[in-house]
Amino acid sequence: MLRISDIKLGTDDTESDLRKKVLKLLGVKNVKSFEISKKSIDARKKPDIHYVYSVDVETDNEEYYAKKIKNSQIVKKKTYEFPKCGKFDKPVVIVGTGPAGLMCGLTLAQNGYKVILLERGKCVEERMKDVEAFWEAGFLNPESNVQFGEGGAGTFSDGKLTTGIKDFRIRKVLEEFHKHGAPKEILYYSKPHVGTDNLSKMVASIRSEIRKLGGEVRFSNKLVNVKTDNGEICGAVVESDSGEYVIETNNIVLAIGHSARDTFLMLQNRNIAMEQKSFSVGARIEHSQEMINKSQYGKAYKKLPAADYKMAVHLESGRGVYTFCMCPGGRIVASASEDGGVVTNGMSYFARDGKNANSALLVNVTPSDFKTDDPLAGMYFQREIEQRAFEVGGKNYNAPCQRVGDFLGTESDSANIVEPTYKPNVTWVNLDEVFPKFITDSMREGIVLMDNKLHGFADSGAVITGPETRSSSPVRIIRDKKTMQSNIKGLYPCGEGAGYAGGIMSAAVDGIKTAEMVAINNGRSKNEQ
């Protein structure tokens, strides 16, 4: 396969124009196969904004063209292969159906292993009804919400598939997502996303395949304890609508997500090794999407998709402030999972056609900020802020909100007055009433510095809605680097909730890696049989 890179096209050009350009480069009328391998937008030099492509073509004399054409090379397509291991009788119990749990379960099921996926929340179809009831009327179901239910917290997000990790399993994740309903562009776009509308269909499709392969997916089934024998897992204690029961198993995968606080407490009581870890706290900042587009693209903004941004600054205090989970054309959503707490997050549909843009504006929090060595100190820190926000917001799940101009102490005379998108509603407050001083001081300094990178970021008409406390897990469930097991044999901490991922892609990859290790640790190599 011949890969030709750095092919530039204008904003008005189409993929048909791309094919014509490649054929002209080769000097041929046709090729055996033609596939886009990468697509990105280069907006570094306004107004010279263009698309940049890499394409894979199959043709005769590829070695000749690789030498002749600039920025071209021969590439070999790699296919994911699961390790060849023996099977075992008892099922693998996977706790949680977020990206980590689903990909762990799917990978094991595809390779002939028995799996039972436990999800404390509901299937995505029923979950969406509960979430809408909360957004529209403030009726919170603590077991079925933005945090809990099929697909995990990522189901109600922008569905970003970008990641900082480099792993050959990423391709398998993308191909599985596309197979189950994600748009084809995720296979090649430099900043792929699927949107919450596609995510909900995708996770339902993955669930169906797991069941077709003989696996089980049990909703409204919550892990409440683990059974051990001589330091090894021998069972999972599960709570369901019909009562408590035990699944005999030697392998439990903990893909529990970052908000399973009662599960963290259970694990702590069972002396499962855990430790504090750094995480982040802040709020969502909301701007006009048109303003962001103009700032990022200049005059060409109408010809291009909704613009995004990603920024990070380091303060003199030593803290970091950064944007996270930016949602172009999106909205801010109520994301509480506990009574008496307010939590916010961002969400976009695939079209990204909403009036506003929003992003988390986060401040780094480290174990040094806590006055205790309790592994769950970060969890209690999050909860305290969420409960304070609930009180300040009016005790009705309204989110505390403030204009950027008021927050910074500047004139609120902007022409870009932004209307908050958060539901059920917002309460206009001084955000200093919600957060510790070091959080608000850091956010203020961060906004001003970021305005130097993206003009208009500190616009007085923008709004800040908070708090955002669930960007990542506040705890790490310790696992062995080689076997991926905890201090209890057969217990596998996995994904974002366990502290080993940060986003949909890295969580999904960790799910696949965990599936491999479950097979390797339990089965004998076929070569040894």
Image: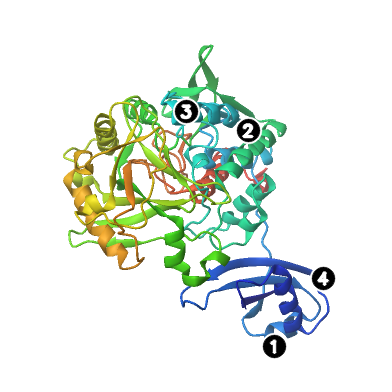
* Image mark for residue 32: 4
Is residue 120 rendered to the left or right of residue 428? right
Q: Quadrant of the N terminus?
A: bottom right
Q: Quadrant of the C terminus?
A: top right
Q: Amino acid type of disc 4?
A: Lys
What residue is at 68 percent from the left and 64 percent from the top? Answer: 77
Secondary structure found at label 4: loop
- Give me the C-alpha separation between circle 2 and circle 4: 44 Å
Q: Report the label total.
A: 4
| Residue 241 versus residue 8 in the image, above or below | above
User: Are discs 4 and 3 less than 8 Å apart at CB?
Assistant: no
Q: Residues within 10 Å of mark 2 (few under 14, many from 20)?
A: some
User: Are discs 3 and 1 less than 8 Å apart at CB?
Assistant: no
Could you tell which of marks 3 and 1 lies nearer the N-terminus?
1
Could you tell which of marks 2 and 4 lies nearer the N-terminus?
4
Q: Which residue is mark 1?
A: 68
Question: Residue 354: x percent and y percent?
Answer: 51, 49
Q: Amino acid type of disc 3?
A: Ile
User: Are discs 2 and 3 less than 8 Å apart at CB?
Assistant: no
What residue is at 41 percent from the left and 44 percent from the top? Answer: 480
Q: Amino acid type of disc 2?
A: Phe
| Residue 53 versus residue 328 in the image, above or below | below
Front-most of residues 239 and 274: 239
Could you tell which of marks 4 and 3 lies nearer the N-terminus?
4
Q: Please name which of the two marks, 4 or 3, marks the residue nearer to the observer.
A: 4
Q: Residues within 10 Å of mark 3 (few under 14, many from 20)?
A: some
Q: Amino acid type of disc 1?
A: Lys
User: Are discs 2 and 4 less than 8 Å apart at CB?
Assistant: no
Furthest-bottom residue in view? 68
- Give me the C-alpha separation between circle 4 and circle 1: 19 Å
Is residue 44 rendered to the left or right of residue 338? right
